């Protein structure tokens, strides 16, 4: 299996399909706790006409896992850095499209597109949003939130973030319990680190303005409880000239649940651009 070593010395698994062709390149970015294999239904269709590059982020899938837990590790920064290094490693010097799934994969796609606007030909966001999940603490916190809070995230946390933290921190600590002994933190230090991460996340979301100008397709699921359709609608408002599609009878894993519909939307969108 192909691996490349990132700047921290970890081996990251990647796939490079149709590498010897002159076909347009598409990069696939998976979500938190997922892997490149999530896109198998999309790869089966796209590989007929495109070069496909995908990789498992550090700690995911077939890539190596960090030896120690770091509560403040910036997953977004690391994935963007690793993707940049992978593209150099594979000598990719032409424009390419990006497809990102979920809050992490979709957010990486947005941030990478803003960082490299002339390199990205198009962007496709699947079940994505504007939430800044980039480490274990933020992911656990968000998973503990009820659906109605996710629907109106900023409005709710603006008025009751302290109450939310009081209710969620004990569960966050419980979820982390297996990894905490090696951190050597007092209870107060641990609470402060968790609170700091959540407050930073909320601040980043409030300040987030996606300056994306390339053609963008946003696909949401009507039954998505993790990234509610309201987030897709919000992204559509935030990204000029974007196209929005909400799929009925589809949840957060629409690319697998309704693969025929998703694949058709993706194929038609890319075909129009080309």
Image (cartoon, grey):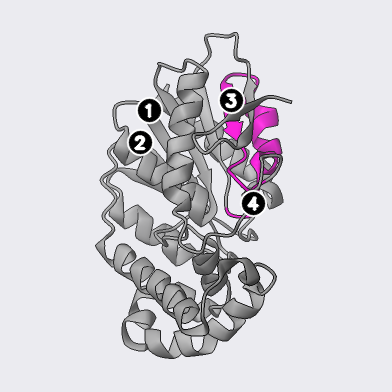
Q: Is residue 71 magenta?
A: no
- On screen, residue 5 versus residue 93, left or right, reads right
Nearest to the observer: residue 121 or residue 27: 27
Q: Earlier in the sequence, mark 2 or mark 1?
A: 1
The residue shown at (50%, 60%) is 135
The quadrant the N terminus occupies is top right
Could you say whether the residue bearing mark 4 is in a helix, strand or loop?
Answer: loop
Q: Earlier in the sequence, mark 2 or mark 4?
A: 4
- Pointers 2 and 1 in contact (C-beta within 8 Å): yes
Q: Estimate how packed mark 3 is, as few (under 14), some (14 to 19) or many (20 or more) residues with alpha carbons within 10 Å.
A: many
The residue shown at (30%, 49%) is 239
Q: Nearer the viewer, mark 2 or mark 4?
A: 4
The quadrant the C terminus occupies is top left
Q: Nearer the viewer, mark 3 or mark 2?
A: 3
x and y percent of residue 79 in the render? Answer: 48, 42
User: What residue would you read off at disc 2?
Assistant: 215
- Pointers 3 and 2 in contact (C-beta within 8 Å): no
Q: Which mark is residue 121?
A: 1
Could you say whether the residue bearing mark 3 is in a helix, strand or loop?
Answer: strand
Could you say whether the residue bearing mark 1 is in a helix, strand or loop?
Answer: strand
- Mark yes or no: residue 137 visible: yes
The residue shown at (70%, 70%) is 178
User: What residue would you read off at disc 4?
Assistant: 67
Mark pair 1, 3: CA separation: 14 Å
- Pointers 1 and 3 in contact (C-beta within 8 Å): no
Q: Estimate how packed mark 4 is, as few (under 14), some (14 to 19) or many (20 or more) residues with alpha carbons within 10 Å.
A: few
Nearest to the observer: residue 162 or residue 241: 162
Q: Is residue 41 magenta?
A: yes
Mark pair 3, 2: CA separation: 19 Å
Mark pair 3, 4: CA separation: 30 Å
Q: In this rendering, is residue 188 above or below 128?
A: below
């Amino acid at each position: 299996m192909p691996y490349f070593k990132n700047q921290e010395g970890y081996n990251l698994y990647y796939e490079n399909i149709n590498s010897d062709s002159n076909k347009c390149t598409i990069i696939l970015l998976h979500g938190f706790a997922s892997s490149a294999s999530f896109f198998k239904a999309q790869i089966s269709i796209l590989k007929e006409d495109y070069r496909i590059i995908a990789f498992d982020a550090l700690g995911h899938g077939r890539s190596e896992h960090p030896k120690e837990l770091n509560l403040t590790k910036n997953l977004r920064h690391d994935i963007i850095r690793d993707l940049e290094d992978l593209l150099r490693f594979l000598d990719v010097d032409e424009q390419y499209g990006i497809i990102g799934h979920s809050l992490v994969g979709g957010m990486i796609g947005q941030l990478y597109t803003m960082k490299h606007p002339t390199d990205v030909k198009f962007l496709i966001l699947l079940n994505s949003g504007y939430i800044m999940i980039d480490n274990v603490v933020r992911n656990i916190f968000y998973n503990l939130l009820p659906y109605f809070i996710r629907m109106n995230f900023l409005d709710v946390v603006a008025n009751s973030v302290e109450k939310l933290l009081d209710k969620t921190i004990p569960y966050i600590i419980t979820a982390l319990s297996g990894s905490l002994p090696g951190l050597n933190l007092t209870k107060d230090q641990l609470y402060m680190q968790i609170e700091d991460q959540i407050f930073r996340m909320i601040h980043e979301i409030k300040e987030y303005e996606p300056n994306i100008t390339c053609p963008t397709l946003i696909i949401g699921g009507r039954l998505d409880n993790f990234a509610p359709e309201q987030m897709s609608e919000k992204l559509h408002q935030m990204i000029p000239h974007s196209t929005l599609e909400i799929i009925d009878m589809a949840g957060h894993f629409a690319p697998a649940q309704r693969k025929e519909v998703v694949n058709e939307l993706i194929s038609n969108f890319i075909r129009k651009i080309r």
